Amino acid sequence: MNAPRTRVQRRPVHGVLLLDKPLGLSSNQALQKAKWLLRAEKAGHTGTLDPLATGVLPLCFGAATKFSQQHLDADKTYETTVRLGLKTSTADAEGEVISVREVSCSAGKVVEVLDLFMGPISQVPPMHSALKKDGKALYEYAREGETIERDARNVVIHDLDLLDMQLQGDAPFLRLRVRCSKGTYIRTLGEDIAEALGCGGHLSALRRVVTGPFEELQCVTLAALESMDEIQRLAALHPVEVLLPGYTEVGLDRENAGKFLNGVRRHGPWDDCDQVVVYGDHPRALLGTAVVQDGELIPGRLLSPIEIQQILEKSPASEPLLAEQV
């Protein structure tokens, strides 16, 4: 006879966990692990990292999932290693080697080529990516041996710093730090740089060190989260409003806050603004986002009254951890 299975007793959890995603896990696998550890009812992330990439992955819980889209447009910073001389089928270390070439470029040539990739550039998305065509991810076509025509995308490389390089020996490489706009494929960037150097190459390591206002030093690992008790795990969460940096703040009294949460526009002495975060007074509580047009505060993404109450109460951690399921 099989022993009764146990399942986690889920609970409302609201906030943002800045996770240092480990090597080998997909973003969703990391999310599900953190969700299980926090016993959260609802969770999502703000964009993905490949399994071979590590680093900053903001995870959103509860009410924070309503604002995860706000973070997708944020600039990102990566540190990456480009292995020169070996081109792979996937532009990273997971693929098969499809080309081997001698590395004969000079340090001066490296600097010259890196300058070519600064500023606005055009990229063709790789076949091994999650970008969809007719509802199907490109990597699914690639696994079936099919190549789909892709339109080039315009992205911006704000900074491209050479951290280290080795042009001789058995494993020549470049180590780069890249600050870029949303939608930039670092694998494609690394492969294109290596092609411009005349030797080809692939990404052998990739780490995201900054995304928007969040940096790697603020992050917690899954191992650290696992070693914490319930109270410490909840304390590791950042408030929902960290997803709204730079938003103009508007405060509403109790009467106007109630009407605002019902979707009713409010009038006030506010300047026009496209990015407004709205708080209720006494007690201070996040209500949602809005825009101001001609003195009207127009509701955007709103928290529900129950979400607001749960955040104010800071859901207690004294509930039973497990419930039996027969």
Image (cartoon, rainbow, N blue to C red):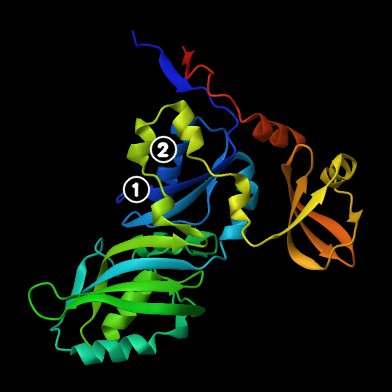
Choose the circle earlier in sequence order: 1 or 2: 1
The span from disc 1 to disc 2 (Cα, nearest Å) is: 10 Å
Q: Is residue 268 left or right of residue 177?
A: right
Residue 191 vs residue 63, the one in the foreground: 63
- The picture quadrant where one finds residue 49 is bottom left
**Residue 25: mark in rendering:** 1
User: Which residue occupies the extreme right position in the image?
Assistant: 267
Q: 10 Å neighbourhood of mark 1: few (<14), some, or many (≥20)?
A: some
Q: Is residue 94 left or right of residue 185?
A: left
Contact check, label 1 and label 2, Cβ < 8 Å: yes
Q: Residue 231 appears at what percent x and percent y?
A: 48, 28
Q: Is residue 31 left or right of residue 271?
A: left
Q: Secondary structure at mark 2?
A: helix
285 in relation to 41, above or below = below
Residue 305 visible within the image: yes
What's the amino acid at mark 2? Lys
* Residue under label 2: 33
- The picture quadrant where one finds residue 102 is bottom left
Q: Residue 112 appears at what percent x and percent y?
A: 30, 92
Q: Secondary structure at mark 1?
A: loop
User: Which residue occupies the extreme front position in the image?
Assistant: 282
Q: Residue 104 appears at what percent x and percent y?
A: 14, 88
Residue 76 vs residue 149, the one in the foreground: 76
- Quadrant of image for the N terminus: top left
What's the amino acid at mark 1? Leu
Q: Residue 154 appears at what percent x and percent y?
A: 52, 80
